Amino acid sequence: MGRFCYVGLAVLTALLIGMAQSLVALPPAQAIASAPSEIRGVWLTNVDSQVLFSAQAVNETLRQLASHRFNTLYPAVWSWGYTLYPSQVGEWATGYKQGLYPDLEDQGRNEALESAQGDRDLLLELIQTAKDLNLSVIPWFEFGFMAPANSPLAQRHPDWLTQKQGALPTARLDLEGRHSRVWLNPFHPEVQQFILDLVAELVDNYDLDGLQLDDHFSLPVAFGYDPYTIDLYRQEHRGQPPPSNPYDAEWTRWRAAKITALVDRVFWTVKARRPNAVLSVSPNPAAVAYTQHLQDWPRWREMGYIEELIVQVYRDNVAGFRSALRDRDLQQARRHIPTGIGILTGLKDRPVPMALIQQQVQVARGMGFAGVSFFFYDTLWTLAEGESEGDRTQAVQRVFAVPRSRPSLAHAPNPTVASG
């Protein structure tokens, strides 16, 4: 027995020495691969930004991000009622193949720029450049079910729109800042098929690493009082109409469950075509997402549909940021799937100090989250009061001091509900 232990110890020692020697001999690329992983993302949009408007800008932007050790891009591909890539599905629904260049004043396309670019495929350009730089690309459905009120999508398909209680047309409108929005009805089968067709088109035609739904893949709680939804509710409730209180618990639960059922179909649409592509979701914190927007993402996570979670925790102070990260649903998620934190780097004319951004990154790391993503690219470099260009750039470089790969799923997705 004693000799057996001695031999076993000797063998174990030799193995450990061999492992140590092999680690010392690792070349840099392998050493990076074995380092802890981290989501290092940034959202790219066509609003208040021109980084997507030319091949040169895309190339320069991606090379800058790679040199600053980012590893994930979330480019908008569905925004302002248009696709940002040439789309047969989009052309059928809106009359236009794409709408990469928005005219924010009339909520439409900038026809001069669109014409000059022809059928330029931004997404194909971006993916090809990203692959060369070892950057993952997860296209982002920025507008979800939302659309400008005067968009071709809304005008061509008024039966696709849902509404609040009250008289038309104002009952359909939802003011976001100075812009009037409408909401596609996520319960309407033609709307669902349109979304699924967009997803299928993207996954079929592009070499994607995943697809991201955000806080607009939802519905404001005041909506759902359109004729189609009322009739559907009556069919499932023995002729009873929906409660007049939009916050009614059962009415909220019924609508949220219908959206969850659609997420099931999105998930399987992706997996049937590209099994290794992840379904990423970037929602608001859970309580707000559910009570205000009928988005039950904790349930989506429980059912196995979310494979990467980036929760938008946009706070202007560290204490509030840290408190939001203690949320029970967020803590549960990070124990099961790669869960990162969305950090606001500023809005147009409202830059965020780099010191605050750095502190929030450190808090997220210290609390065990899988990484961060910044909203959005341009404001990451926008100077706040008292900052110099050199200081800001150096600070961004220090956020990601050494390279890291993206987290991978610990196991294959195993949703608890099979798709029909």
Image: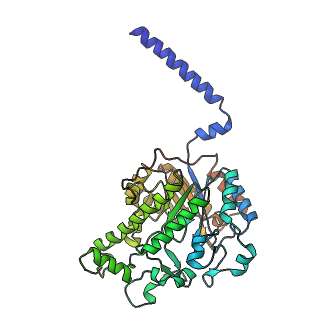
Give the vertical position of 155 relative to 138 (above or below): below
Nearer to me, 265 or 357: 265
Depth check: give the residue in front, 111 or 249.
111
126 left or right of 360 in image: right
The picture places residue 208, in percent across and down from the top left corner, at 59, 56
Residue 7, compared with residue 399, is above or below; it is above
Q: In this orientation, does residue 232 appear?
A: yes
Furthest residue in direction top, as rendered: 3
Hey, which quadrant is residue 94 in on the image? bottom right
Between 299 and 35, the residue placed more toward the observer is 299
At 56% from the left and 45% from the top, the residue drawn is 37
Is residue 340 visible in this depiction of the protein? no
| Residue 242 sits in quarter | bottom left
The quadrant the N terminus occupies is top left
Instruction: Tell me where residue 21 appears, x and y as whole percent.
Output: 62, 25
Q: Residue at x 40, y 91 (%)?
A: 167
User: Residue 162, position in %: x, y?
Assistant: 43, 80
**Left or right relative to 392: residue 17:** left
Q: How is the image coloured?
A: rainbow
Q: Nearer the viewer, residue 126 or 403?
A: 126
Quadrant of the image containing the C terminus: bottom left
Q: How far across and how far down the image is residue 203, in percent? A: 56, 59
Q: Is residue 160 left or right of residue 252?
A: right
Q: Is residue 71 left or right of residue 6?
A: right
Farthest residue in the left direction?
Answer: 238
Q: Look at 25% across and 75% down and name the residue there.
A: 237
Q: How many marks?
A: 0
